Image (cartoon, coloured by chain):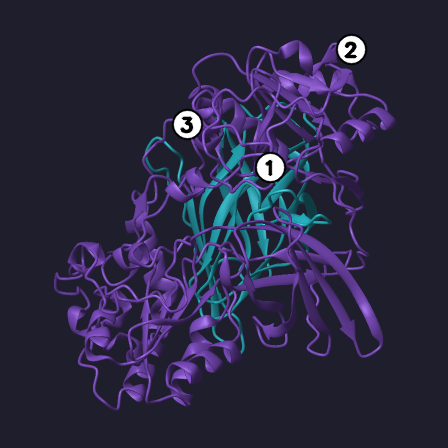
Chain colours: A cyan, B purple
Amino acid sequence: MPPVRRLTRLGGPVLAALVVASVAAGCSSGSASIMVADPWARASSATAAAGAAYLKIENTGSAADALIGASSPAATTAEVHETVAMGSPAPDASGDGGMMGMQPIARLEIPAGGSVELKPGSYHIMLIGLKQDLKPGDTIEITLKFEKVGEIKVTATVRES
Amino acid sequence: MTDRTPGPGDRPSSGNYPGLHTPPTMAASPRPVAPTRLALLTALALGFAALAGIAIGTVAWLSLPTPVPPSSTAGGAIWPVSPTPEGLARDTAVRPAALAPSLRLADQEGRPFDLASLRGRPVLVFFGYTHCPDVCPTTLADVRDALKLIDGGVGVVFVTIDPARDDAAAMKRYVDYYQAGFFGLTGSDDEIRAAAGAWGVSYAKVETGSASGYAMAHTADAFLVDAEGRLRHKIWFGAGPEIIAARVNGLATEVIAAPSPASPPVATPTASTPAAPTPAPPSSGPSPSPATAVRVRLESTVVRAGPNRIVVTVSDPNNRELAKPDVAASFTFRSTDDPALAPVEVPGMFIWVVRGGKAAYVAEMTLPRPGGYDATITLDGPAGRVGSAGFTMVAREQSPTPAIGAPAPSVRTPIAADVGGNLQLLSSDVFPDPRFYEHSVDELLAAGRPFVFTIYSPAFCPTTACGPLLRYMKEIATEFSALTFVHAEPYVMRDLGGRIQPEYEGNGYAWASWSQAYGIPVEPYVFVVGADGRIVASFELIVGSDEIRAAIRTATGE
């Protein structure tokens, strides 16, 4: 089902779009209610092989939901990826000495009452085939696809870091 | 020192919940929490849940201006953690400080490049590839931002580990975008392999099925070479611009790690020690990996000399996490600072993080000294050897959290009476358990009662280790009804008209006074405290229910 509520608003010098969607799951397990906060994309040249966007997702509902895809008019393809420590020698406390790798995430669960942050060095939306330079201050649209609440469109600000 | 000494965290915590002592705006709702409170609580919670769809939208509107953090000088991201004193103090020194490995490749203009030509100024060297969307841009942006905080010139050298796709033109497009003057190096397959090997950099091609083609896994540390050409620091990925700048700015004044491996980490100043001419490889170079049918990831952030509990997660080569209770693990830890020490060997314990879903292995051991350790986990299932994998870790002399056996810091934690029984103002749990908010930590210590103290934010926990911890804690509290359980949000919370959200400090959430008193660097944390007021057990990030049960039995002398 499409989102029941959809809100966006600009806040202050940084564009702080916050979008809310909630939907009843249709069974006794409660409902998912998804909030998306502070989407941003890293400044990048269109000639770069890939860009990245980050945001925070909060599920204030009582049923789990999951991010299952993304798209953006600014890129040919958008995929949800996770940067992970992998291989050997494996990392110490925070990746020291280990390899950092990347894997596509087909389904990123947002637990009921929980939140997941897409941030540098962790989950991110990989923008493949950029159609334009991402210049600081620009905004790009990103559509997030959730299993339960459906699609949520957010406006991400381009920043250098 | 057997008694608890009042610490800075002993003060009442009124300042921590700015909205806490104003009458709750939802005061019309039933607020006394009666002894037979479960039914009432459930009714409250269900009512809350029913309203959630609407109420959350309203709160979201109200809260919009607050999440914008203060702008930082380095223009950091909105959500990342700002550098903690602990991060700044983290040991990144390379021991011994020997000449850096040579680095002779071609730069982005196709000209020959030799690292030695940059002598006379510090140089930051790191490896990556241009199809990298997250890690490499983060490092390049961090380095670029660090330069603004550094006095004097610094060479910046980015070396590709993906020469098949990264020719000189690709490197030029990539590094020039960040800052003119950065070097982007490439070479033949063999040249890159040799260079990476000399620097202790591992890399591997990973077919991910992504539309962007294959990905490269690679060592993402930044290497800091001083003006004399010595490799001085290896800075972990994600350290951020402030820490990179601090290491560069500190080169001139810090004591250079002595070349004698027998020296303790804090070497006596031998200021005139010349650069050791031995062309030693980086101290934690490419250690040959054991059979790696599995991958291991160290989840714990606190490793210390002495008694330890560390948690690792294990996955297969396709990064599917291993969650099989019938696969047994054993661990070996070898000190790299004193290889003569006998290795520590312990069995691992399987724990569920999410029952039937996510799992982890716990090792409990005593590490004989601080410093580096090479660790190995070996996994055996009913059908034989599953695999083994190595990892490295650094044991600190002291940990930021109280050690096992140390007195638990006496802090005032918020209780239901502080908020007229409106538990939604104390906890971001959708179903707060009233038993967790009846007594403050300082009260329990003063009364000599054993307790379990959970510091966790179910709604705002920022790591992937967050699970249904409080749900399990409620089950445990029911089993051990004689014991007291305390839960507190880790952050300073702000009341937004009946719902709470963390306050910001710098670029992250602001730690509450009790989190600071207990020195926790991450959440969740669970402390089990005995009747004598001393820490019986502490659990970081990933906690198994049975581990908590065992610690409780110890604390209560069962």
Identify residue for label 3.
B74
Identify residue for label 2.
B110
Residue that appears at 53% across and 54% down: B369
Q: Nearer the viewer, mark 1 or mark 2?
A: 2
Q: Is residue B492 left or right of residue B186?
A: left
- Mark 2 in CB contact with mark 3 (< 8 angstroms): no
Q: Position of residue B31 (x, y in %)?
A: 19, 77
Tell me if residue A73 can be seen.
no
Q: Position of residue B206 (x, y in %)?
A: 79, 45
Residue that appears at 74% across and 40% down: B286
Question: Is disc 1 surrounded by few (<14), some (14 to 19) or many (20+) residues within 10 Å?
Answer: many
Question: Is disc 3 surrounded by few (<14), some (14 to 19) or many (20+) residues within 10 Å?
Answer: some
Q: Is residue B537 left or right of residue B58?
A: right
* Residue furthest to the left: B22
Does B386 sit above or below residue B337?
below
- Mark 3 in CB contact with mark 1 (< 8 angstroms): no
> Rounded to the nearest whole Å, what is the CA distance between mark 1 and mark 2?
29 Å
Tell me if residue B417 can be seen.
yes
Q: Earlier in the sequence, mark 2 or mark 3?
A: 3
Q: Amino acid at mark 3?
A: Ala
Q: The N terminus of chain B lies in which quarter of the figure?
A: bottom left
